[in-house]
Image: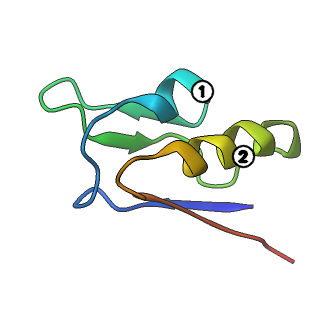
Amino acid sequence: MKVTVDEEKCCGAGQCVLIAPEVFDQRDEDGIVVLLDAEPPADRHPAVQESADVCPAAAIRLSVRG
């Protein structure tokens, strides 16, 4: 799985950080998403998928590597 984020779309809701803190963080100054792991291991895929699903700004994109 390859993860990308669109900082321009991010509204700083922080749901991704709560769900997958190993993969996402937020900038202190404005709460915008910071991607910590663009290719997380398989055991984190469900949490990353959930993060993308609940993102209110649809700022998280996932692609399957294969």
Q: What residue type is labelled 1?
A: Ile
User: Mark 2 = which residue?
Assistant: 40
Q: How far apart are marks 1 and 2 (CA)?
A: 14 Å
| Number of the label disc, if any, that sits on residue 19 | 1
Please tell me whether residue 18 is drawn above or below residue 53 in the rendered image.
above
Residue at 79% across / 73% down in the picture?
Answer: 65
Q: Can residue 21 be seen in this snapshot? A: no
Q: Is residue 29 left or right of residue 9?
A: left
Residue at 48% across / 28% down in the picture?
Answer: 17
Residue 38: where, in percent of width, then height?
59, 54
Residue 48: where, in percent of width, then height?
66, 43
Q: Quadrant of the C terminus?
A: bottom right
Circle 2 packing at 10 Å, graded few (<14), some (14-19), many (20+), is some
Circle 1 packing at 10 Å, graded few (<14), some (14-19), many (20+), is some
- The chosen color scheme is rainbow
Residue at 24% across / 44% down in the picture?
Answer: 11
Of 22 and 46, which appears nearest the observer?
A: 46
| Number of the label disc, if any, that sits on residue 58 | none
Residue 32: where, in percent of width, then height?
26, 40
**How many labels were placed on the picture?**
2
- The mark nearer the N terminus, 1 or 2, is 1
Helix, strand or loop status at disc 1: helix
Please tell me whether residue 25 is drawn above or below residue 33 in the rendered image.
above
Residue 39: where, in percent of width, then height?
68, 54
Q: Is residue 54 left or right of residue 44?
A: left
Residue at 69% across / 49% down in the picture?
Answer: 49
Helix, strand or loop status at disc 2: loop
Q: Which amino acid does label 2 sit on?
A: Pro
Please tell me whether residue 47 is drawn above or below residue 35 in the rendered image.
above
Report which quarter residue 29 is drawn in. top left
Q: In which quarter of the image is the N terminus?
A: bottom right
> Mark 1, mark 2: which one is toward the viewer?
1
